[in-house]
Each structure stands twice: as structure tokens, then as C-alpha cells.
Image (spheres, rainbow, N blue to C red):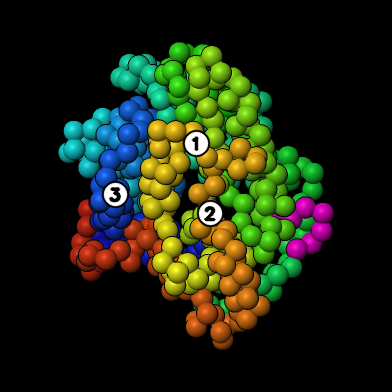
């Protein structure tokens, strides 16, 4: 079939198998171009099919020749129905990994569930023995708690008072004011239950109890802080509470891994275009201005550049891992540079529907958004018939 993008709000309802495949190949080629990293050998990536999780799996495999197991929840392709982008991403990654002689298998299902955890433990035990790196990169709006059965839904809201500021519809370029009412205590609790650290800790407890963690095992989860511009709706809002919980959980996990000499880290990453960030008011406008400034300074990074630098310059240097005063890895250091933030703040004041095409990089934002779904990828012929049914080679 010929697949074209069908967009509803901040979601694209279709994805392109060839575009997703080329995207993955491009990321693999970037990692290879940066040389090898003396890194992990057996890696579990929870949330492995898109964004930072996918980039972590690619970097582990193609910088360190690691065996990888990916856990994700994606819609398979079927005749006449394209799969989700994460399905096609994983198929492309595993195809490339197998051709390179690398072990790569995956499990498709709800990573919050006990059933998927047990299935993953069984696979590790059967095939790899022990894991030396666990990447936790789940991004879900909903969680069914495996012990209580309660369904928790996360929300994007400020805490304490209504938040009002500029935002942009990145499809039309229309800059407008947005107001978001404050969260209730229940909203906060639900968001922490979905996006906090409880499930990360559950995964690590299960792996340790099954003796599947190698001595010196490392685990990394991903977070974001961002600038003062976005903090009311992000870092000081419901998501920020969840990230606070995630970051506190790193210390709890580290304590639990002391007998293995293991360590848990939270890596604070750069603002990037993701399905999640596209849904947060204010963030698309901030990112379009940030992209403009960072590209002009020659320091712009996408997900793969961020994660490759995280592995090479932070996690696997052969020495101590550099962290901030709260124990976090700061790979958002270029974004948060004073000169970068000062310029973004100045542009923010100037941003209107009329000025944004000149002062921002909305085209870069839109291109990155469509690339998430395999569209607008250079070298792909979108007029050509493609087979929408693609198998994931290592699916268990």
C-alpha cells in the first residue's frame, strides 16, 4: 500500500515501515561513525522501541557489541493496517543487529505487568544469564498497577494555581495563549504512580531476586528539568512530581545494589520532539526556539547524539560517573548553558505567529515530529508501494 501521514492533533495515526527503517539505519550509522565504547555486554531496555530507549538499544549494540533484549508495547502491523512506529523501528533494529551477528530479542506487552516481567526474566535466564545494564525508558500515559489492579492515568497540569503562557500549534504555526487549571491531589498521585520510580524499582527488585544482575550492574532512567519558562507546567507540575519520585528512586535502587557494587542513575536529557513532548502546552514553542539557537551554535543534538554522548562521555569513561549535586547525570548541559537560555528567553518575548518563522525553527520541529512516524525521511520514496506487514525478527 501507499502510506501517507494522517495526523490528529499531536498524534500521527499512520507510520511508514521504510521511513522508520531508514531512520534506524541512520542512527546506527551515526553510532558507528563515533567509534566503539567499552560499555555493557548484556543489556535490557525497558521501553525500547522509540526515542531515548531505542537510541540506548542502538548505542549498546553498535557501539559496544552488546546483546540486547527490548521490552515495549507496540501495535503489530497487519494487512491493510500499518503497525505503530515502534513496531517498525524494532523490526529494523533487530534485522540490522542480526545481520551484524548480534543477539537481539524482544517482548511486546505491558511492561508494568507481572506477566511481562516474568517473561523477560525467563528469557534473560535462558539466553544471557545476567544483565550488566538496565535502561528504563517507559513513556506511558496509563498504568494498571500489577498489585492493586487500579488504573492510574497521568495528567499534564500545574500545581497550586492556573498556568497561562504562550504556546504554538506546530501544524499551523499559530502562537496563542494557553491556560491550564491546576491539578488535584488525586491527579498528582496518579501521575506519580504512572511516571514515577515505583515500576523501575519493581523491575530491579525482580531482576536481583532472580540473580540476573551481573556484579557492577548499572541501571539508568531518563528525566528532564528544563528552563524557568516551562517549569510551572513541567518541572513544578504533576510531571515534575513524578520525576522527583523517579530521581529519589535511583538512590533507593543504588542502596539495594550495594552487595553487587551496582549503581542506579537518572540521566537528565535535552528537550526533544517526542509524542509526549508534543502534547505538552508551551513545550513545542520552547523547542522550536531552542532548536534555532542550538543549531546556530553548532550544538544541536537529537536522541541518538544525546545517548551516544551519554555512553561515551558519562557512563563508560573508565572513571567515576560525573553527577550534579543531586546525583543526576546532566547530559542536558548544552541546552542549559547560560548563553543558550538567555537567547531563548529573549526570543520567547518576541515570539508571535508573525515572527516565529524567522526567530524559531518550527520547520525543524515539524520534520522531527513526522520522522517519529517514518515520514519526511531523506532517501525514502513515499510514492512507492510498500509492504505494510513487517515481522519483528527476534520477537519472543
Q: Secondary structure at mark 1?
A: loop
Residue drawn at point x = 43 percent, y = 51 percent: 306
Magenta highlight: main SS:
loop
Please say whether residue 247 is visible from this viewpoint.
Answer: yes
Q: CA distance from mark 1 to mark 3?
A: 20 Å
Give the answer, above or below, for where 207 lies relative to 185: above
- The residue where tag 1 is placed is 321
Percent from the top left, x then y, of residue 379? Answer: 22, 65
- The residue where tag 3 is placed is 34
Residue 125 horizontal side relative to residue 386, left or right: right
Residue drawn at point x = 63 percent, y = 26 percent: 252
Residue 333 disc label: 2
Q: Which stretch is magenta? A: 157-163
Few, some or many residues within 10 Å of mark 1 (<14, 14–19, 20+): some
Q: Secondary structure at mark 3?
A: loop
Please say whether residue 196 is visible from this viewpoint.
Answer: no
- Which badge, 1 or 3, is on the more N-terminal residue? 3
| Picture quarter with the C terminus | top left
Instruction: Assess whether mark 2 and mark 3 are in contact (beta carbons under 8 angstroms).
Output: no
- Which badge, 2 or 1, is on the more N-terminal residue? 1
Q: Outermost residue toward the front?
A: 319
Q: Secondary structure at mark 2?
A: loop
| Picture quarter with the N terminus | bottom left
Percent from the top left, x then y, of residue 183? Answer: 76, 51
Give the answer, above or below, for where 247 lies relative to 203: below
Amino acid at each position: 500500500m501507499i502510506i501517507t501521514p494522517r495526523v490528529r492533533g499531536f498524534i500521527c495515526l499512520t507510520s511508514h515501515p521504510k521511513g522508520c527503517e531508514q531512520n534506524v539505519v541512520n542512527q546506527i550509522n551515526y553510532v558507528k561513525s563515533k567509534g566503539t565504547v567499552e560499555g555493557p555486554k548484556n543489556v535490557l531496555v525497558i521501553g525500547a522501541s522509540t526515542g531515548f530507549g531505542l537510541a540506548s538499544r542502538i548505542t549498546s549494540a553498535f557501539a559496544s557489541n552488546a546483546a540486547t533484549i527490548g521490552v515495549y508495547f507496540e501495535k503489530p502491523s497487519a494487512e491493510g493496517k500499518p503497525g505503530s512506529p515502534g513496531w517498525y523501528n524494532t523490526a529494523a533494529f533487530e534485522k540490522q543487529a542480526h545481520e551484524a551477528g548480534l543477539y537481539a530479542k524482544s517482548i511486546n506487552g505491558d511492561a508494568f505487568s507481572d506477566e511481562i516481567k516474568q517473561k523477560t526474566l525467563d528469557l534473560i535466564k535462558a539466553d544471557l544469564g545476567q544483565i550488566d545494564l538496565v535502561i528504563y525508558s517507559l513513556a506511558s500515559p496509563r498504568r494498571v498497577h500489577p498489585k492493586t489492579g487500579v488504573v492510574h492515568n497521568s495528567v499534564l497540569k500545574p500545581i497550586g494555581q492556573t498556568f497561562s503562557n504562550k504556546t504554538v500549534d506546530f501544524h499551523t504555526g499559530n502562537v496563542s495563549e494557553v491556560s491550564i487549571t491546576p491539578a488535584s491531589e488525586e491527579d498528582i498521585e496518579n501521575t506519580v504512580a504512572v511516571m514515577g520510580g515505583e515500576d523501575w524499582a519493581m523491575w530491579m527488585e525482580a531482576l536481583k531476586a532472580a540473580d540476573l544482575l551481573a556484579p557492577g550492574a548499572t541501571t539508568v532512567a531518563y528525566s528532564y528539568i528544563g528552563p524557568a519558562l516551562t517549569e510551572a507546567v513541567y518541572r513544578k507540575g504533576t510531571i515534575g512530581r513524578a520525576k522527583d519520585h523517579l530521581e529519589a528512586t535511583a538512590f533507593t535502587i543504588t542502596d539495594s545494589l550495594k552487595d553487587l557494587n551496582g549503581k542506579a542513575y537518572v540521566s537528565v536529557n535535552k528537550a526533544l520532539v517526542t509524542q509526549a513532548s508534543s502534547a505538552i502546552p508551551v513545550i513545542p514553542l520552547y523547542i522550536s526556539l531552542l532548536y534555532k539557537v542550538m543549531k546556530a551554535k553548532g550544538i544541536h543534538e537529537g536522541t541518538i547524539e544525546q545517548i551516544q554522548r551519554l555512553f561515551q562521555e558519562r557512563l563508560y569513561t573508565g572513571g567515576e560517573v560525573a553527577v550534579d549535586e543531586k546525583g543526576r547525570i546532566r547530559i542536558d548541559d548544552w541546552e542549559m548553558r547560560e548563553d543558550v537560555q538567555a537567547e531563548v528567553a529573549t526570543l520567547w518575548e518576541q515570539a508571535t505567529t508573525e515572527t516565529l518563522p524567522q526567530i524559531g525553527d518550527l520547520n525543524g520541529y515539524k520534520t522531527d515530529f513526522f520522522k517519529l512516524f517514518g515520514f519526511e525521511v531523506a532517501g525514502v520514496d513515499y510514492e512507492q508501494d510498500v509492504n505494510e506487514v513487517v515481522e519483528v525478527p527476534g520477537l519472543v
